[in-house]
């Protein structure tokens, strides 16, 4: 279906129209809307810095009260204890456990869906599958959280790992959170990977079919490798999304802060702690709130780094075919 | 792009936003102090359900008054109370000196009213078949700071060789303060490696989902989830058999020692001048008391109720 081109575009685009006052006003209005997002980002960074690193206004920031050394090298996170300790690692441990499990679930599922959609599915299948996948992306995360707590843990993990294999599965555990977050990022991996798979030039497929490749050979040995950097970028973005996921993990993973690799134990994530800190606060314990900003700052830096890396990978990918 | 469509979309999203913010305002009750006919309460998760139900009953009788009640924990509530953000703070313990100082700083004068009794309930999973009763000393061994107890058999060799999963409220909670004082001897002293949550329902979920779990919270939350939990008798002596299981009778009489305690509301004196607040409090200590057993909590004795009413009358003079 080709959209009809509006009249003012057919004449060729000039900037003449923008001299008219109402055009200017519209342009200004649109610019304002665009600036809101920029302004919000800047405000967030300012707030994080103000409460995390250096106070321009208000009480002393977190890192003016707690040394970076303790933050990075202490092994316990007890911000509200009478003898507080601020080692970020238990929270980072929880976050990466959840995100790791999420990627182990979400990446294969998303990638296989993408290959199917791009290489195998006909228009009819696509027209059903794509909206359903997108629907999955629209489910509120709090619903995923309860799904993890009241379905995945008691009806999937406990029978499978506790009854059958003898592991002990806690009510709140990292695995259930990871699994639901994995399901959550599946549509993201699928749709981004599908885009890059479809942008692999037709000629590559034709050439490999001409050499006698089966559909599987073509998909897995030619198209996927050709789109690998784009796929990798989508995986990284999914990972970043999983790291930032909050509601589902707060509900499913519990509040136990520990360093460990047992997926069937409760672990608090960085986002989970931020929720915790904003819910209740002891009197005279302003440091708890400040510590949440420090955690948020770390989270921001982690996701920013991942986003930048995935952008770099994507850009490199574009250079190959353009 | 069709500009008219674009404009319609923008307008639509704006309306969406304003509806949303109106909803939020209703829930949080921000800046509500001083505004007409809203009595804003926050604080303890133990007392919150009582104030909530009393508020609903009161709203039914007075359609022009709203009583929004939120639950953030006694400590957090006192913070907001001292800042003048709320009219009433639900408190499952008495006000601390540091909180008194904050109220003074904020020029907040207040009245303390005892409203009910609670017995902090120690619960285990309903499938737990090896324990019915626990002594204060055993609880201390389990919960004291730097406790090395990991497994049930570390406390009693006849108990199983399984990890104890501990669930308890967070530090913002008055229940936490009271429990740590009564069991560990010092307010706020506790081991730190347990699952804490300000949401008692999450503690219920945690204990009910794990055969080897143990947790504590207000009696009301046990009453509400009786079928999922097993209540333990608590003994203040070294003999577990002398334990007492919390019930409305023993909590009211104080025989459920040392975990029976009075719970309070703290009312801003400035708010007391508003007639609807005065009327609400009179209702709270009168007909409103019927709400207490309905949310699973325990009424105070006739003598205590009389004293509370006298305190209210004094404050209203």
Image (cartoon, coloured by chain):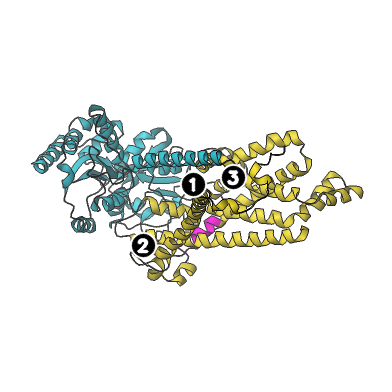
Chain colours: A yellow, B cyan
| A264 falls in the magenta region | no
Do pointers 2 and 1 mark residues of a single chain?
Answer: yes
**Label disc, if present, on residue A287 of the rendered structure:** 2
Circle 3 Cα neighbour tier, 10 Å, few/some/many (<14 / 14–19 / ≥20): many
Q: CA distance from mark 1 to mark 3?
A: 12 Å
The crowd level at tag 1 (other Cα within 10 Å; few <14, some 14-19, many 20+) is some
Residue under circle 3? Answer: A184
Q: Is residue A257 above or below residue B25?
A: below
Q: Earlier in the sequence, mark 2 or mark 1?
A: 1
User: Is A75 within the magenta?
Assistant: yes
What residue is shown with label 1?
A247
User: Is residue A276 among what the camera can see?
Assistant: yes
- Vertical placement of residue A86 versus B100, above or below: below
Q: Secondary structure at mark 1?
A: helix
For the N terminus of chain B, the image quarter is top right
Q: Residue at x 18, y 57 (%)?
A: B104
Q: Give the number of the disc on residue A25.
A: none
Q: Secondary structure at mark 3?
A: helix
Magenta-highlighted residues: A74-95
């Amino acid at each position: 279906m080709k959209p009809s081109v509006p009249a003012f575009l057919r004449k060729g685009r000039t900037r003449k129209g923008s001299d008219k006052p109402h055009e200017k006003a519209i342009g200004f209005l649109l610019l304002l809307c665009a600036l809101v997002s920029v302004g919000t980002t800047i405000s967030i960074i300012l707030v994080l810095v103000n409460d995390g690193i250096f106070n321009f206004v208000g009480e002393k920031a977190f890192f003016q009260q707690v040394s970076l050394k303790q933050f990075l090298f202490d092994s316990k996170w007890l911000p509200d204890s009478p003898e507080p300790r601020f080692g970020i690692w238990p929270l980072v441990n929880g976050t990466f456990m959840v995100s790791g499990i999420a990627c182990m679930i979400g990446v294969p599922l998303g990638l296989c869906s993408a290959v199917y959609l791009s290489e195998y599915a006909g228009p009819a299948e696509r027209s059903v599958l794509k909206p359903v996948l997108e629907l999955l992306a629209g489910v509120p995360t709090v619903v995923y959280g309860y799904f993890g707590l009241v379905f995945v843990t008691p009806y999937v993990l406990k029978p499978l790992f506790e009854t059958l294999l003898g592991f002990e599965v806690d009510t709140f555990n990292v695995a259930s959170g990871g699994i639901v977050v994995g399901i959550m990022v599946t549509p993201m991996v699928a749709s981004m990977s599908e885009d890059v798979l479809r942008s692999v030039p037709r000629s590559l497929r034709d050439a490999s079919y001409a050499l006698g490749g089966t559909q599987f050979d073509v998909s897995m040995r030619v198209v996927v490798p050709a789109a690998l950097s784009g796929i990798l970028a989508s995986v990284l973005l999914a990972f970043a999304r999983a790291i930032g996921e909050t509601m589902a993990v707060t509900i499913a993973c519990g509040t136990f802060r520990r360093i460990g690799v047992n997926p069937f134990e409760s672990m608090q994530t960085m986002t989970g702690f931020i929720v915790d800190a904003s819910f209740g606060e002891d009197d005279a314990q302003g440091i708890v709130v400040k510590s949440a900003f420090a955690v948020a700052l770390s989270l921001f830096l982690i996701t920013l780094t991942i986003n930048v890396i995935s952008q770099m990978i994507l850009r490199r990918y574009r250079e190959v075919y353009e | 792009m069709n500009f008219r469509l674009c404009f319609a979309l923008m307008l639509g999203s704006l309306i969406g936003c304003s509806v949303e913010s109106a909803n939020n305002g209703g829930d949080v009750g921000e800046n509500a102090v001083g505004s007409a006919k809203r009595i804003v309460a926050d604080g303890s998760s133990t007392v919150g359900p009582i104030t909530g139900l009393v508020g609903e009953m009161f709203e039914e009788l007075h359609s022009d008054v709203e009583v929004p009640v939120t639950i953030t924990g006694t400590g957090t509530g006192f913070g907001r109370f001292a800042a003048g953000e709320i009219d009433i703070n639900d408190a499952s313990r008495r006000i601390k000196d540091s909180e008194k100082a904050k109220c003074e700083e904020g020029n907040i004068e207040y009245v303390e009213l005892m409203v009910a009794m609670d017995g902090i309930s120690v619960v285990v999973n309903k499938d737990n078949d090896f324990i019915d009763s626990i002594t204060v000393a055993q609880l201390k061994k389990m919960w004291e700071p730097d406790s090395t107890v990991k497994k049930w058999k570390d406390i009693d060799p006849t108990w199983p060789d399984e990890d104890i999963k501990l669930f308890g409220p967070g530090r913002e909670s008055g229940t936490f303060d009271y429990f740590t004082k009564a069991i560990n001897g010092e307010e706020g002293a506790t081991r730190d490696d347990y699952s804490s949550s300000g949401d008692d329902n999450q503690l219920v979920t945690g204990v009910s989902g794990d055969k080897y779990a143990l947790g504590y919270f207000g009696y009301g939350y046990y009453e509400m989830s009786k079928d999922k939990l097993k209540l333990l008798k608590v003994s203040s002596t070294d003999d577990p058999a002398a334990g007492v299981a919390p019930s409305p009778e023993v909590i009211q009489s104080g025989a459920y020692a040392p975990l029976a305690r009075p719970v309070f509301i703290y009312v801003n004196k400035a708010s007391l001048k508003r007639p609807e607040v005065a009327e609400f409090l009179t209702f709270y200590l009168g007909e409103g008391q019927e709400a207490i057993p309905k949310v699973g909590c325990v009424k105070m004795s006739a003598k205590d109720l009389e004293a509370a009413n006298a305190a209210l009358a004094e404050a209203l003079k």
